[in-house]
Image (cartoon, helix red, strand yellow):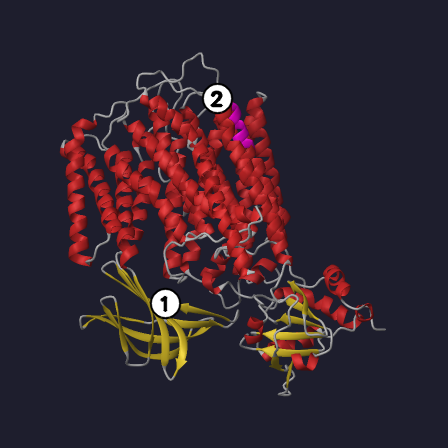
Amino acid sequence: MRPELGHFALILAMLLAGLQAFFGIAGPALNRDRWVSATMSAVAGQLVMVATAFGCLIMSFVDFDFSVRYVAENSNSALPLFYRIAALWGAHEGSLLLWILLLAGWTAVVALATQRLPRRFVARVLGVLGFLSFGFLLFTLVTSNPFLRLEPPAPDGVDLNPLLQDPGLAFHPPVLYTGYVGLAVAFSFACAAMLEGKTDSSWARWARPWATAAWAFLTWGITAGSWWSYYTLGWGGYWAWDPVENASFMPWLIGTALIHSLAVTDKRGLFKSWTLLLSLLGFSLSLIGTFLVRSGVTVSVHSFAADPTRGTAILIFLVIAIGAALALYAWRAPTLRSNAGFELTARESFLLFNNILLVIAAATVFGGTLAPLIAEALGQGALSVGPPYFNPTFLLPILPLLALLSIGIHAGWKRGHLGDHTRAILVTLGIAVALALAVILGVYGGRHFLTVVGLSLGGWIILSSLIDPIDRLRRHLSFPRSILGMSLAHIGLGIAVIAISILEPFTVERDIALGSGESAQVGNYDFKLIGTRQVEGPNYTAIRAEVLVSRHGRTVTTLFPEDREYWVRREAESKAGMKNEYGTDLKVALGDDLGAGRWSMRVQVRPMITLLWLGPVLMALGGFCALTDRRYRVARAAESVPIGASAPPGAAKEHAA
Amino acid sequence: MTNSASVRTHTTGPRGSAARAKTAAQTGAEPATAQAAAAAPTAQAPPPAAKPRLGRFVIPLAVFAAIAIVLGIGILNSRSVGVIQSPLIGKRAPAWSLPLLDQSGRTFGSKDLAGKWYVLNFWGSWCFACKDEHQELLTLSRSTSVPIIGVDWRDEDADARNFLAALGNPYATVATDHDGRVVVDWGVYGAPESFLVNPQGVVVFKQIGPITPEIWNKEFASRLPAALADHKS
């Protein structure tokens, strides 16, 4: 009964989303005031229905209802409650339902938080969101219904994929999807503005906090994914330029460009058509990412079960949604005018370069991701594109971007007045280069030109970002949260750049074979195998090794890598033993039993990797911090239209919790 | 074959990058013009007399159309990937020999099947799709004369026996592959997967996923001599 209730709720949700789209778009166009009001009701109804469906599926997992096919395929009677809940989004159907729930949630938050904006504009925004929601619900119901029954019911489930039995599953997808879906809000604001034919830049002011929130979630979600793949999935690195990683990275790059370009459109009324386009591109790329993950056209560690029917359905939806938005853009954008100029050294030009470079970076990633598909489409056979392509081509636009950031951060709007800051720019650069050289020559040794460049740029960004906040504090000037957020995010970027600069050249990874009592040196550390024994987990058995790590004769830690066999799915999984020492990761993964007590193992030493997580976390925090800025908290009575109050503080955060 | 593939792959390099460069140039077009406006600081943007040019604003739509076409072709290709093909097709099947499920301690393998048509079906009691397929296999075992040989892999023997006891046994013979060695030789990466092997020991067809009546008629029966494909009775 419960699965049928969920199924029915999902159908109702789809109908309501359809109504929301119709009333929201047709109401303002045909001047029907009651239709505009009906849009809001549809939003509420849709959220209730989607939440009901979601709740039904959760309860089916919690209650071990193996008559539901999706539950039987993704859980097991031995699976702990925590993973039974997270298992909901462990495969295609459920993760789609999560996506839909988050979209409905964002929509409701938008409806609640935009009460000061013109009602018709809000109705249009909700209408566009309703259209997107309708598309996803239709797709789910037709090709990916999670409520299908098994006849007869399975006696037990086949268990959740062991790779996913990790706390990372509970956090990474929801946060990442919150970011992905959040970009739909900026997309909808842009579409609404174009439908309305507004040529001023007020929409940009309204859309700005939403774009920032989506960007912050996306930053957080990608970092969580990278952290998860590195720590628990044991895929080796933190970033592999996998098609699906790229699918999340491209919207992030465009989102980053968007939040900068929105600032210009908001403050100076410039780049209007460009900002519109970026708003559309951000979500379009998250849709294309969805397509890449779920259609099976690309081979990836993340791919859900490949199904061309699903691929075709997403492609049709993608063409309708993105095609309509871009057609609208081609029609409306020519009417947009910018009526302000700025000097070459003004903040506007630096942000313009920021945008160009970020879009080029996104385009190189996009090209590399699609190249295998294009080669195949042209009948040129299989083509594999990996780090040898991505690493250098990505650096080309990114290095100048980092350098321009450290200069541009001092530039004022309209007229740069950079001359006043020449000393600060040169002094920070000098200190950063000196520190970089000292670190390389003093701590790590060796000649690494790119590392020195990276460390200098990272340090320069951090120092440059500190100047304005310090100046404000010293002179007791106002220090708005938006400035604090911006500084935090830039410092985070600098930290991430430093981390990558050290990680890339100084990571040591080696395969060794040890018998009990033997040891081997990797990097500056000694790894000694004490012994192995058999242990029992809740749904697996494992061999656990004890490895003593020491440096220069001093014991650092003991690691316990495991080789697990999950008995329900009969899958083996290696659980690495890991310890972080002063930001450096020491990691041992158990390989094969070589007999006679000898084991092969993979040992990794990754210096400064903690900074790699710290950097993006600061960036995301910066984004959230900017959201709590006064202008969004306090309703300001402004010129013609009331502005601000678009996002109450923490609205987005509550939503994620 | 590998050689020619790599040569062909090589030729895409320049083309691919040219296409990328073009996309980058096109997407960059808008800010480039804005930059021109930036260079003339005092200009009040475009002169009011200038007609709004539709041209460059259509570019994103055009680029997207091209991308959508590529994605569409990707879908078409991925659909055919499911059907093409194991590299084993047209080649001699890997020799194999495995213990029987019946606890007799005997082994069974390719030698015992020499000179016969047979269907080799990889399954497991842990596999859901196998349960779906089972009914069809039972029907087939009654209607055709081709022996269906089951390879039960990564399974407990007791589970497998219970499975067959509960649902019926369509197999002429069931062998067990506990550590998946034969599975690897045959390039199986899921269950169920089935191979059609001819009397010369050559793999004629591989089915990934459950056999359905349509698939049986279209892919298996059509390749079999009529006498075997039709029902025995």
Q: Residue at x 45, y 14 (%)?
A: B50
Instruction: Name the magenta segment's main secondary structure.
Output: helix
User: What range is drawn magenta here?
Assistant: A324-333
Is B139 in front, or is A377?
A: A377
Work out whether mark 2 precedes mark 1 in sequence or the reverse, and give the earlier one: 2
Taking the magenta stretch, the answer to whether it contains residue A452 is no
Secondary structure at badge 1 equals: loop
Q: Which residue is mark 1?
A: A576
- Expressed as whole percent of the image width and height from the top left, the position of residue A381 reads 55, 52
Is A479 in front, or is A66?
A: A479
**CB under 8 Å between discs 2 and 1:** no
Image quadrant of residue A413? top left
Please identify the residue farthest to the top as the structure is shown. Answer: B49
- Mark 1 belongs to which subunit? A
Q: Which residue is mark 2?
A: A334
Amino acid type, callout 2: Pro
- Mark 2 belongs to which subunit? A
Neighbours of disc 1 within 10 Å: few (<14), some (14-19), many (20+)? many
> Can you say whether B195 is above or below B54 in the image?
below
> Can you say whether B85 is above or below A263 in the image?
below
